[in-house]
Each structure stands twice: as structure tokens, then as C-alpha cells.
């Protein structure tokens, strides 16, 4: 007979399956994402409002993590909530196209002069995977050039940016070529050695994992020239950096890619990814064409992410981007005036900030985790890699308070205190 008793922590037969720690052992390590890992059991988020969040210890925090830079309008922005609620009430997902997808396509392409068409996905990872596939289908080649220690999501090819990793198909390795960040000579050599191997060069213009220093315009322009000369596509991965300019960071640099991947901020806090590009390449996805390749996804272009994204981008006016970026610049200057004497610096660009030791090679995982906890104790939530992202509900006073608290945490970490 089938038992009707519902499993609960008290009636699960195997006592090892009882939870001794939050999330344990139902989630491996207690986590639903590896990126949550901060060395010790982390707090749980229970409520968010604007730039504030509260955890299950009742602690009020400045949310400088913003779901890893996604929540550019803070938590539960009323206009975004209203748009999402309205979309949910009307039907959260359908199996034929919806009008909000069209609206977001228009909103995005208005911001991307030179790019003609767009497809939506559910994450930045998916967007990058699709961009690679488009580049391969268009060029008939397999090779991808990436910068060393870039981050382009968690697909097999993208993970190879940090070298071979357990679980990643070995067959992918021969197709990925890594170039040291900013090394123009090496980039040229890669194409000299194999002029017809590469389908694409992918660049994250502000690579967080590699140190949160923007790529130089010279390097980006050389990538543009080499891609054009050798029939490869240039992809800008703006999943994080799109927030930095009305047309993304590529727009600020004045360089046009063939394809651009976006995510995070463009979904208003809901799952999203996007591949925008020139029509001559994007048309490979056109199902009317006998040559077309497939790109789908049950939740791609769902009306909730689309409607929330439209409002998020409407709220993210050029003036708001400029205000947020200058708040970031001021915070960096304010922090550096204190931190340099302690052997640290605040790096980043515009509204994205991250503390590093002056000799960035000294930064190890253990130091990052100590800094995360020191910031948390001071009332600031960072990403596990210590990246901080400002949000539009923040004004001068909040950013000053945030900077003060973060600087205090860095000094404590620099001094080796727990
Ligand atoms: C530059 C870049 N590309 C792609 C991704 C993957 O995006 P997602 O986490 O939405 O899959 C990320 C995630 O942080 C990223 O920083």
C-alpha cells in the first residue's frame, strides 16, 4: 500500500536525510548555485526593497550584489513588479509568440544601432551558446578565440576560458584558443597561424573574473580588424557590461560587433538572455529559410521576462546610467583615497566596483571569502567574488554609506582580522 504520509524532516526514514544545516543535504553542499559559496553557511534572503534586503537573521543589508549585477533597479521595483504581475495574470507563458517579445526586441534594438535582429533565451549562458552556434553555422568553422580567464557562462566551451575543467567534454578543447588579456601580438599570431580556423572571437569588455579592468580600445579594435580580415565573427559578451552605457560598453568604445550577447539587467530581475546581431548572420535562425538552424527554449521570450525587461530598460535612461556610473566613479575615488595606503585598490568601471589587493596576484579564494564576510558583518552584500553593483534606487548618501562600510571591510581583511 502507498503511504499517504508526507515526508518531513521528522518522518524521513533515513536520519542522514534530515536537515542538519540549511539546505543540507537536499542540495549538494547546501547550495542551489555554486556561485553562492562563501566558505561558511551563508544567510538566506527573505525580503528585498529597493537597495535594501533582509536576511533570515533579521539583518538589514545594503544589497550590492543585486543577484550578481542583475537588479539594476533594486529589489521589487514597483513599476517592474506591476508589469510582471500583469503579465502573470494574463498568462505566464504560451506556445505561440507574444507581443511583449516584440516590445522588448524593439526596445533592445533601439539601443543597439548597427545590429538588426534579436532572439531571446533564458540566461546569458544560453545566449553565448547560441552565439557560438550562429557563428559556426555562418562560417562553417569550429574554432572560438577567447581571452584567458574570461567568463562567458557555464556551457562546455565557455568554461574552457579558464582552461580544462573536470566534466567539460575534452572534444571541446581543440576548438578553443585562449589569448592573454590585452595581448594584441598574441591575438594576431593566433590568426596568422590558423587564418581559417576560427568562427568567432568573443570578448567580455569588462572581465570580472580576470580582474575587472576594461579591455583597451586598441585590443578591441584589433579584434574587430582581425575578425573582419579572416572571415570570423566578433561577439561582444555584454551580459554584465550592458548596464554601463545606453548602448552597452561596446557603444561607449565605438566598436560594432557582429553579434552581442546580453542578459541580467535586460529582464528586470527575471530569467533572460539575448543574442542580437546583424541580419546577415541572425537570418541563419530564420525558420523560413531551408538553411536555418534551430534555436528554441520552452521559456525563451516568455511574456513575464519580456514585460519586466521593457520596463527595466525604459527606467534605465541614458541620464540614469550616467548618474549611476558617476556615483560609482566617486565611490571608487573615495575608496582609493583610503585603501591604497592599506595595499588595496577599488577597481571597476562606472556602476561596477570590486576591491583587489594592489598586487592582484595575492587575491586567493580564502581572502575573497573573508572579505565577503567582513562586508556582510558591516551590512553589505557582495557577490561571492566581491563584485559590487550599484542600483538606481541608490542616491549619494547610500553610496557613501556603502563605500564606507566596504572600505572598513577591506581594511579588516587586509589586516588579516577575522
Ligand atoms: C560576461 C558573462 N557572460 C555570460 C554569463 C552567464 O550568464 P547567466 O548566469 O545568466 O547564464 C555571465 C554570468 O555572470 C557573465 O558574467
Image: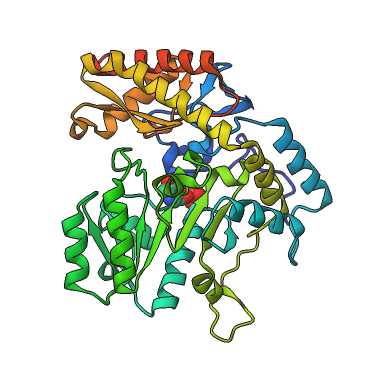
In the image, residue 188 sits, relative to residue 80, either above or below, namely below
How many labels sit on residues? 0
Picture quadrant where residue 172 is located: bottom left
Question: Residue most toward the bottom?
Answer: 290
Q: In what quadrant of the picture does the C terminus appear? A: top left
Q: Position of residue 381 (x, y in %)?
A: 47, 25
Report the quarter where the N terminus lies.
Answer: bottom right
Residue 259 against residue 416 in the figure, above or below: below
Observer-nearest of 271 and 59:
271
The structure residue drawn at horizontal position 41% and vertical position 50%, both measured from the top left corner, is 254
Vertical relation: 90 (above or below) 283: above
Q: In the rendering, at what x and y percent does residue 390 appear?
A: 50, 28
Q: In screen coordinates, is 115 left or right of 298?
A: left
Q: Residue furthest right?
A: 90
Report the colour scheme: rainbow
Residue at the (31%, 53%) spot, across then down: 220
Q: Residue at x 51, y 31 (%)?
A: 322
Quarter of image, res 138 = bottom left
State the residue in front, 94 or 212. 212
* Residue 252 in sight here: yes
Q: Residue at x 24, y 18 (%)?
A: 340
Question: Going by the image, does 194 lie left or right of 111?
Answer: left
Q: Is residue 165 visible?
A: no
Q: Position of residue 7 (x, y in %)?
A: 65, 42
In the picture provided, is 369 more to the left or to the right than 106?
Answer: left
Q: Position of residue 137 (x, y in %)?
A: 44, 77
Amino acid at each position: 500500500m502507498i503511504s499517504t504520509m508526507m515526508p518531513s524532516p521528522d518522518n524521513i526514514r533515513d536520519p542522514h536525510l534530515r536537515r542538519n544545516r540549511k539546505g543540507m543535504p537536499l542540495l549538494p553542499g547546501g547550495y542551489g548555485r555554486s556561485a553562492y559559496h562563501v566558505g561558511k553557511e551563508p544567510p538566506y534572503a527573505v525580503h528585498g526593497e529597493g537597495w535594501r534586503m533582509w536576511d533570515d537573521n533579521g539583518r538589514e543589508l545594503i544589497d550590492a550584489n543585486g543577484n550578481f549585477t542583475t537588479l539594476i533597479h533594486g529589489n521589487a521595483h514597483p513599476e517592474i513588479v506591476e508589469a510582471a504581475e500583469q503579465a502573470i495574470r494574463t498568462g505566464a507563458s504560451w506556445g505561440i509568440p507574444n507581443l511583449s517579445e516584440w516590445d522588448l526586441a524593439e526596445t533592445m534594438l533601439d539601443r543597439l544601432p548597427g545590429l538588426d535582429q534579436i532572439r531571446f533565451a533564458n540566461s546569458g549562458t544560453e545566449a553565448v551558446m547560441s552565439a557560438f552556434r550562429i557563428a559556426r553555422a555562418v562560417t562553417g568553422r569550429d574554432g572560438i578565440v577567447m581571452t584567458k580567464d574570461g567568463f562567458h557562462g557555464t556551457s562546455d566551451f565557455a568554461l574552457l576560458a579558464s582552461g580544462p575543467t573536470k566534466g567539460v567534454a575534452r572534444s571541446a578543447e581543440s576548438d578553443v584558443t585562449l589569448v592573454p588579456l590585452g595581448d594584441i601580438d598574441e591575438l594576431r599570431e593566433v590568426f596568422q597561424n590558423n587564418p581559417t580556423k576560427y568562427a568567432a572571437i568573443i570578448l567580455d569588455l569588462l572581465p570580472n573574473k580576470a580582474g575587472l579592468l576594461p579591455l583597451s580600445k586598441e585590443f578591441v579594435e584589433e579584434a574587430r580588424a582581425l575578425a573582419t580580415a579572416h572571415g570570423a565573427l566578433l561577439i561582444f559578451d555584454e551580459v554584465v557590461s550592458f548596464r554601463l552605457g545606453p548602448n552597452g560598453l561596446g557603444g561607449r568604445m565605438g566598436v560594432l560587433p557582429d553579434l552581442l550577447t546580453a542578459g541580467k539587467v535586460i529582464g528586470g530581475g527575471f530569467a533572460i538572455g539575448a543574442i542580437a546581431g546583424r541580419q546577415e548572420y541572425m537570418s541563419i535562425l530564420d525558420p523560413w529559410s531551408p538553411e536555418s538552424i534551430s534555436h528554441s527554449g520552452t521559456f525563451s521570450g516568455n511574456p513575464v521576462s519580456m514585460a519586466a525587461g521593457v520596463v527595466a530598460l525604459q527606467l534605465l535612461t541614458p541620464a540614469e546610467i550616467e548618474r549611476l556610473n558617476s556615483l560609482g566613479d566617486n565611490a571608487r575615488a573615495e575608496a582609493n583615497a583610503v585603501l591604497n595606503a592599506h595595499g588595496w585598490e577599488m577597481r571597476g568601471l562606472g556602476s561596477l566596483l570590486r576591491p583587489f589587493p594592489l598586487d592582484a596576484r595575492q587575491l586567493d579564494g580564502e581572502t575573497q571569502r573573508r572579505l565577503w564576510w567582513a562586508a556582510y558583518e558591516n551590512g553589505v552584500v557582495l557577490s561571492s567574488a566581491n563584485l559590487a553593483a550599484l542600483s538606481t534606487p541608490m542616491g549619494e548618501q547610500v553610496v557613501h554609506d556603502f563605500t564606507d562600510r566596504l572600505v572598513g571591510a577591506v581594511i579588516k581583511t587586509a589586516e588579516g582580522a577575522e
